[in-house]
Amino acid sequence: MSNPTYSKTELMIVNAARLLQDGDLVFVGVGAPNLACNLARRTHAPNLMMVYEAGVIGAQPARLPLSIGDPTLVSGATAVCSMYEVFSLYLQRGNVDVGFLGGAQIDRFCNINATVIGDYQHPKVRLPGSGGSMEIAAWANRCYIMTPHHKRRFPEKVDFCTSAGFLSGRAEREKSGVRGKGPQAVVTNLAIMKPDINGELEVTALHPGVELNEVQENTGWQIKVSSQLERTLPPTEEELHILHVELDPTGIYVN
Amino acid sequence: MSNPTYSKTELMIVNAARLLQDGDLVFVGVGAPNLACNLARRTHAPNLMMVYEAGVIGAQPARLPLSIGDPTLVSGATAVCSMYEVFSLYLQRGNVDVGFLGGAQIDRFCNINATVIGDYQHPKVRLPGSGGSMEIAAWANRCYIMTPHHKRRFPEKVDFCTSAGFLSGRAEREKSGVRGKGPQAVVTNLAIMKPDINGELEVTALHPGVELNEVQENTGWQIKVSSQLERTLPPTEEELHILHVELDPTGIYVN
Amino acid sequence: MSKLCSLKEAVAEYVSDGDLVYAAGFTHLIPFAVGHEIIRQGRRDLTLARATPDLIYDQMVAAGCARKIIFSYLGNPGVGSLRIVRSAIEAGELEWEEYSHYSMITRLSAGASGLPFMPMNLTAAPDLEKVNPNFRRVTDPFTGKEVMVVPPINPDVAVVHVQRADKFGNAQIWGILGEQKEAAFAAKKVILTAEEIVEETVIRSDPNRTLIPGFIVDAVCHVPYCAHPSYTQGYYDRDNTFYLQWDEISKTTEGVLQWLQEYVYDLQDHAQYWQKLGEETHQRLKVKEKLSSPINYGEF
Amino acid sequence: MSKLCSLKEAVAEYVSDGDLVYAAGFTHLIPFAVGHEIIRQGRRDLTLARATPDLIYDQMVAAGCARKIIFSYLGNPGVGSLRIVRSAIEAGELEWEEYSHYSMITRLSAGASGLPFMPMNLTAAPDLEKVNPNFRRVTDPFTGKEVMVVPPINPDVAVVHVQRADKFGNAQIWGILGEQKEAAFAAKKVILTAEEIVEETVIRSDPNRTLIPGFIVDAVCHVPYCAHPSYTQGYYDRDNTFYLQWDEISKTTEGVLQWLQEYVYDLQDHAQYWQKLGEETHQRLKVKEKLSSPINYGEF
């Protein structure tokens, strides 16, 4: 499907970066979300601010952080606070514009499972668990998900709902009273999917060279398609240059 | 009544200092309690640690603090924390051995009024209010009170109970489940009073030269007297020297 | 984006009649200059919240800015009674709402954390709970015991004075921290005053010292000696003479009005106020340097 | 009174079979040396609590120290799966109790504050609440809305690694602060390890930097490089090679047992461990100096 000059991960990172707005305060994870934020900062969103769940505000990492607790996030940052504070004063208080979420399963209503495959008490696969995501999904104004597009990652219903998407539909989430607006987009290596008016995911854009049937084949339910289906633009030379040369020169994440 | 070489305030300070134990962590106020702690540290309690409600731990003030927020408490201290933390991590958590309390009225069961004289909504005299004392009285392991002995300061029942002594009696306090053991002694310029088995104040010691009738005349109810009534020792030369020369050379508090 | 502006502009823009104002600083870093500017601009019907109203709210109440006061300790710290606020309450001319220090700061923490309430253990003291409906009880579902809870307070505007900030509002504070951070996060708008405006690199050289991030700040004002007559750790001492004088001045309405005329209304700004205090006062409040040992963040 | 002792003495005295242990440090300042000493002394039936179990609990579980694990994120940070803990759970050989980061740290905050519970806003995610009875709801008496509450956690012993401390246990931490302070205040006993033991005057030169006061600390141990293979801000970098190697080592029981034999059981203490890592590793983990700008506390 892809142009040989960029990888699937780069395709996801570039498209996720384009969803970020200048001035956004982003609750960042390491890996691909970190790259998407740094790419956005170097292109259309110079005033994007990165907050890490370890309690680092306004980080300017000189290298790719090895983990969420990397001192490179701290040296030269604007502020450091405790973990309790970053989740209360920043996230719960409503100061976070964007959160990134990830999980092993994402379902039709964009609910996320990062806990177990199979039964909770006798798991077939024990996954990492929530980490920050239960609260990020609830309290960040907007959330984005980056994940490869595989059928097993997109079941109709998650085995365990670690983090709330739209539950059984947008009305249920709204009734719950959580402040965040929930997932806004799922960016995969094939397409971008966004929740429709009922909170059900629909394909809103296909990446260059990808056809709809490829998306459907890799999705565990009959996926809706937007009436205004678009096609994403391929990564620009500038975007790829920044990723390859400035952000991940050794190709730890992008390859 | 008094030996001309020491003031009434010094008499109270010296007797309060003697009640402090080596190693006590004391929640200190400015003024007389600050002097009592510093006197104890320089005599029998070198390991006494002073914590100020402004969030200063292990203060070693080079001068008499002008207020609870004096930077002299900070320069050279062991630690500083926020006001919320000093009341939660230190006081509420049960880390404070001793608190000092003060108020305009102290009653038969050692309840304290620092709020109003008269009706709350239409006060005859509006007093400063609780400050830290509502929580100190409840959660410090032991509390002490220093106050001049006047009838209007010792009514049978306080107009407003700002801070809990023994309420209607020790049983009521114990039933409330608060962790602190409550007031342990009231040190006045005439005597020391301590709660009896029911939490009612009784005179346990008279200062040099003071007779019981003088205490009774200055107390608003029929005051009980301990069967083991003692007489306090006058301030020693060492104690007075420390107060006069080291702690309050200009006599701001001791005179 | 720089948020630097004059204090005059900041107060004009962010403090409105009827606002709930929280001037932070627990007996240290009290933003007197902002109180004076609010008086000068003639704001009315404010609700003034502070753990310790101190002289700053005494002056604002005297100037007629306030409809109500929210507090936990009412005094002229280290001196005695806070005469103006006290007599206004006694005369029934000022509404009030009262807490202990801890319940006051707990309300602010709940506001800063976006929580609908925060708990406190019971104190057994019965009377404040009876007169203030913001003290309520819930049953702890784990032990069945009762716990006191208070609701959040979210001021319309918080005023926070700090030692140093950059033009974006990233602010560092040392010495007594009081409730500065909680007030800033709880408020809808934040006016920050600073002894020094420093380069962003100074802030970024010590991120653990930053208590307030710039993105929650609306205005950054360079106001040296903002806290006079109170203290600023490392910068100047308390003008205790003034605290003692205020005890006299505030005994009569005439005394207060005359002081306000001379030190607030007749002056343009805090720079003029500081000049007017004169060289003797400047010298008297100076403090000698005592530096912290630097730490190594490391190049990572 | 000095609380200095060897790590061997501290573990012997303050860690008992069956204890609830909280080794603090959110992916920074992880006290690996203490984990190794607990393994060496053969403690059993421990309940191991940490937001991120990281390799330290993977190693302790592999060594048979643990009966149960309490966590909020289970992974080899930046690398992948935490194989030992994961397979022990999948095999039904290890009890577990699970939170989100925020609910985990909220429990610790409640423990540190002496509160019977602390509230959190609802997250709408239904399933963790169903499987963990420590998530309960109360009705907010102010708005009538439901709020989630969790109970305190009060570990028998907290292990906290810091950059510098004095012999009394007054400790300063910079860089990522994680939940170090909360763990120390919540615990019944505290073992403190420090990269450097400094004079009390160093601590007192910068009291705002002190997160943990000595009076809550039981043992102070001088353990340079305690956090290897994790980071210590300003002192050394993460040994990422080891984190990657562990992903291989932990694929087989034999691999793990052999590693434990060679790097834990066969060694006396952490100094030997550090020596064994060799000069190449020492050089690779070094970081260049980057100092904070000092601040002025002032002589008051």
Image (cartoon, coloured by chain):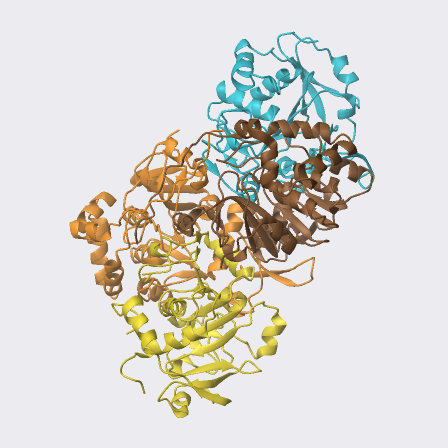
Chain colours: A yellow, B cyan, C brown, D orange
Q: Nearer the viewer, residue A117 or A174?
A: A174
Above or below residue B147? Residue C255 is: below
Question: Residue C2 appears at what percent x and percent y?
Answer: 50, 56
Question: Residue D76 appears at what percent x and percent y?
Answer: 33, 62
Question: Residue C262 appears at what percent x and percent y?
Answer: 69, 35
Which quadrant of the view contains residue A253?
Answer: bottom left
Above or below residue D273? Residue C88 is: above
Look at the image and tell me whether residue D196 can be seen: yes
Q: Quadrant of the C terminus of chain A?
A: bottom left
Look at the image and tell me whether residue B158 can be seen: no
Q: Quadrant of the N terminus of chain A?
A: bottom left
Above or below residue B12? Residue A131 is: below
Above or below residue C181? Residue A44 is: below
Question: Residue A205 appears at what percent x and percent y?
Answer: 44, 85
Q: Nearer the viewer, residue C82 or D104?
A: C82
Circle count: 0
Residue found 71% across the figure and 31% down from its top:
C81
* Outermost left residue: D279
Q: Is residue C69 left or right of residue D61?
A: right
Residue found 54% across the figure and 83% down from its top:
A196
Q: Nearer the viewer, residue A208 or D131?
A: A208
Residue found 25% across the figure and 61% down from its top:
D246
Q: Nearer the viewer, residue D86 or A6?
A: A6
